[in-house]
Amino acid sequence: MNTNIKVINNDLWAVNFNYVEMEYIKELTFTKTNADDFMTITRDGKILLNKAYDLERSISIMTAVMSLPDDLLGTKQGFYTYMRKRIPKWEKKDDKWIGLAIEYYNLEFQEDGYKSACEWEKKRRSVKAEYIKSNKKFFGIDKIKTLFKRKGV
């Protein structure tokens, strides 16, 4: 793996987009992105963050959102779960308490960031599912079945 690529998890990577444009990083290609963009999604469903920006907060937000199941993405319940992950002291608090704390501490802006991150994550999951579906014939069980048929098993 190229040392200019930071793997946060399997689906979230950080890379300097300038390096990709200048072809220093040949392992990655993506379209509709320039060096000033903050984030993009690869054809195989990975989110790439641009290392040209300070990513500490973004990584924390995205990893919290990426851990949510599909049914919670973009929902109020998902937002409360997200806040529990972002603020460890709130981990054992109930939804009502978190709602009141958000109002008290004027953290309503957190919900905007959460919704934006959820939109990116929904798109990533959709792209990844489409990629897996389109490549199913080349990877996985279909390839194994074809090999067995060739061998006469």
Image (tube, grey):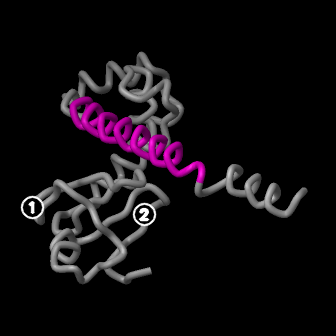
Find residue 144 and report its horizontal and vertical position in percent.
Answer: 74, 57
Looking at marks 1 and 2 on the same chain, the residue that comes earlier in the sequence is marked by 2
**Is 137 situated above or below 82?**
below
Mark 1 residue element: loop
Residue to which mark 2 is pinned: 8
Disc 2 residue type (three-letter): Ile
Q: What residue lies at 38% left-to-right and 44% top-to-bottom?
A: 124
Q: Quadrant of the N terminus?
A: bottom left
Find residue 5 and report its horizontal and vertical position in percent.
Answer: 35, 74
Q: Is residue 80 left or right of residue 117?
A: right
Q: What residue lies at 41% left-to-right and 50% top-to-bottom?
A: 63
- Tell me if residue 113 is in the magenta stretch: yes
Mark 2 residue element: strand
Q: Is residue 117 left or right of residue 81?
A: left
Disc 1 residue type (three-letter): Asp
In depth, the one of 20 and 65 nearer the eye is 20
- Tell me if residue 135 is in the magenta stretch: yes
Q: Quadrant of residue 19?
A: bottom left
The residue at the far top in this view is: 96
Which of label 1 and label 2 is nearer to you? Answer: 1
Label 1, label 2: how far apart the Cα atoms are: 21 Å
**SS assignment for the magenta stretch, majority:** helix
Q: What residue lies at 20% left-to-right and 63% top-to-bottom?
A: 54
Q: Quadrant of residue 98?
A: top left
In depth, the one of 66 and 111 nearer the eye is 66
Q: What residue lies at 44% left-to-right and 21% top-to-bottom?
A: 77
Residue to which mark 1 is pinned: 36
Q: Are marks 1 and 2 in contact (CB under 8 Å)?
A: no
Q: Which residues are magenta?
A: 111-137
Q: Quadrant of the C terminus?
A: bottom right
Q: Which mark is residue 99?
A: none
